[in-house]
Every structure is written in C-alpha cells, then in structure tokens.
C-alpha cells in the first residue's frame, strides 16, 4: 500500500472549518483514500473514503486532487468533540489491511 | 450505534495469568477480523488477521503461541493473551470487515485496556 504523509498536529477554533491535508504521492490507480479518527482511549472511527471523486457524508467532505497525489479532509464546523488523531490511509478496497501511520492530532479549541 | 463490541473494556490481571478478549460484530457478518495493539502515545500496530474458520495470520514479531486468536463464527473472534506479563500491558483493539448493507465495511471496536501487574 502507498505511504501517506500528514502534519503531526493542527489547531482549529470551534465552529470553523478544519482542513486536514494528506500526501499520498505513490498512490496506485486502484487504491482508495480512507480517513479514520481516534478519540482518546477509544477505537478508531471510520469517517469517509474515496477513489478519485470528491465525497461528502454527514461527518465530513473528502477532496482528492485530480492527480490523486494528495487529499484534504474537511470538517465543516469543528466542535470540541472533533478533537482526535486523524489518520489518512491508502489501500485497495476490500483487500489488504489498514495500516496506521502517526496521523494528525487535531485540537479544537473554544 | 456501535457495530463492533469488545469485552471486557478494561482488565487488570496478575503476571502469569491468561486473559481472553472478545470481539463481536453486531449487525453484519465479519468475514475477516483484525487485532491491533496500541502502546501509549503510539499508533495502532496490527498483530494478526483472521478469517472465519481458518488459522490467523500473525504479523512479524507477534508470537502466535502467546496471542491465541480464535475466529469460530462470522460474528465472534477472541484474543487470548497467555501467561501475560507487564510488557503486555496495552490497548487492544479489534476490527471487523464484511458486507454491511451493500458496502464492504471495516469497523473498529472500542478497545480493551489490559494492565498486567
């Protein structure tokens, strides 16, 4: 699976949009971009995934660049409960395991 | 609501004893289950992958005789930490993958915190 690079940490004010970047320059054509988050002392929570089109669900939006070498997870109105470590993972859907890197620690402040 | 449960949520045991952790998929059949371990301030590390009815595949460096995995049904997998020692103290997280609705899905349990004294 392709490797991903994320900033170590980010800050966001409550109510503002949180934009979390991820680089995956070696992504293959059949690899999806997945986002999970882990709130302290809990198991990871699935957020969203996509192949090449932008995706949106009730939690977030995923913007994938046209060359698919990077993506951005957008939390449109961050709340204090969104404070967590966010993991960007690239893998072939239905195959292979989810390999977690260090992720981005997002701190949402009042 | 939760789609993958783990039991117990936390356990404290004496060194040398064995501890069993259960992982259940609640509303879908998990063809594959994964067990991860997470030490403080570190990321999740995959320990093993198991498919229902077959032996688990362990990652390099994980002792299969120490971490016994059973995936006897499509909704239940168990991890038994045998002869636990203080260095086995960690956060153990299971994950279940299968068809939920019309989508292949992978969800994680809430984790089990193990403390070996």
Image (spheres, coloured by chain):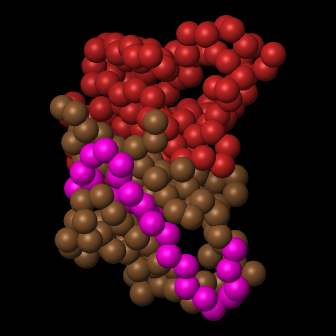
Q: Is residue B37 visible?
A: no
Residue visible at 64% across and 34% down in the picture: A84
Question: Which is more toward the observer, A24 or A60?
Answer: A60
Percent coordinates x, y for residue B92 in the rendering: 55, 62
Answer whether residue B14 is magenta in the image. Answer: yes
Which one is in front, B22 or B67?
B22
Q: How many marks?
A: 0
Front-most of residues B64 and A51: B64
Task: Indicate yes or no whether the magenta region holds residue B15.
Answer: yes
Quadrant location, the C terminus of chain A: top right
For the stretch drawn in magenta, the main secondary structure is: strand
The answer to whether residue B48 is left or right of residue B87 is left
- Work out whether B5 lies above or below B39: above
Q: Find residue A21 and report its horizontal and vertical position in percent.
A: 53, 22
User: Which color has been applied to chain A in this rendered view?
Assistant: red
Question: Residue placed at 49% from the left, 27% from the top?
Answer: A22
Q: Position of residue A94 (x, y in %)?
A: 22, 43
On screen, residue B31 above or below B83: above
Question: What is the magenta range?
Answer: B12-36
Outermost residue, right side: A110
Chain that appears brown: B
Q: Which of the 4 image quarters holds residue B86?
A: bottom right
Report which quarter residue B68 is drawn in: bottom left
Q: Residue at x 40, y 53 (%)?
A: B95
Residue B117 appears in the figure: yes
Question: For this view, does A11 lie left or right of residue A88?
Answer: right
Q: Is residue A4 above or below residue A12?
A: below
Q: Position of residue A80 (x, y in %)?
A: 72, 23
């Amino acid at each position: 699976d392709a490797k991903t690079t994320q900033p170590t940490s980010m800050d966001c004010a409550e109510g503002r949009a949180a934009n979390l970047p991820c680089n995956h320059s070696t992504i293959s054509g059949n690899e999806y971009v997945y986002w999970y988050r882990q709130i302290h002392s809990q198991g990871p929570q699935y957020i969203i995934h996509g192949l090449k089109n932008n995706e949106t669900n009730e939690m977030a939006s995923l913007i994938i660049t046209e060359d698919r070498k990077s993506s951005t997870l957008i939390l449109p109105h961050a709340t204090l409960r969104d404070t967590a470590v966010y993991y960007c993972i690239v893998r072939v859907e239905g195959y292979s395991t989810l390999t977690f890197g260090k992720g981005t620690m997002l701190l949402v402040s009042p | 609501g939760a789609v993958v449960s783990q039991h117990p949520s936390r356990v404290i045991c004496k060194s040398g004893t064995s501890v069993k952790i259960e992982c259940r998929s609640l509303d879908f059949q998990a063809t594959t289950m994964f067990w991860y371990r997470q030490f403080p301030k570190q990321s999740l590390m995959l320990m093993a992958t198991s498919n229902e009815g077959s032996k688990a595949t362990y990652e390099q460096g994980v002792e299969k005789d120490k971490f016994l995995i059973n995936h006897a049904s499509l909704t239940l997998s168990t991890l038994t930490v045998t002869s636990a020692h203080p260095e086995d103290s960690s956060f153990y997280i299971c994950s279940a993958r299968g068809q939920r609705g019309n989508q292949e899905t992978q969800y994680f349990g809430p984790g089990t915190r193990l403390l070996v004294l």
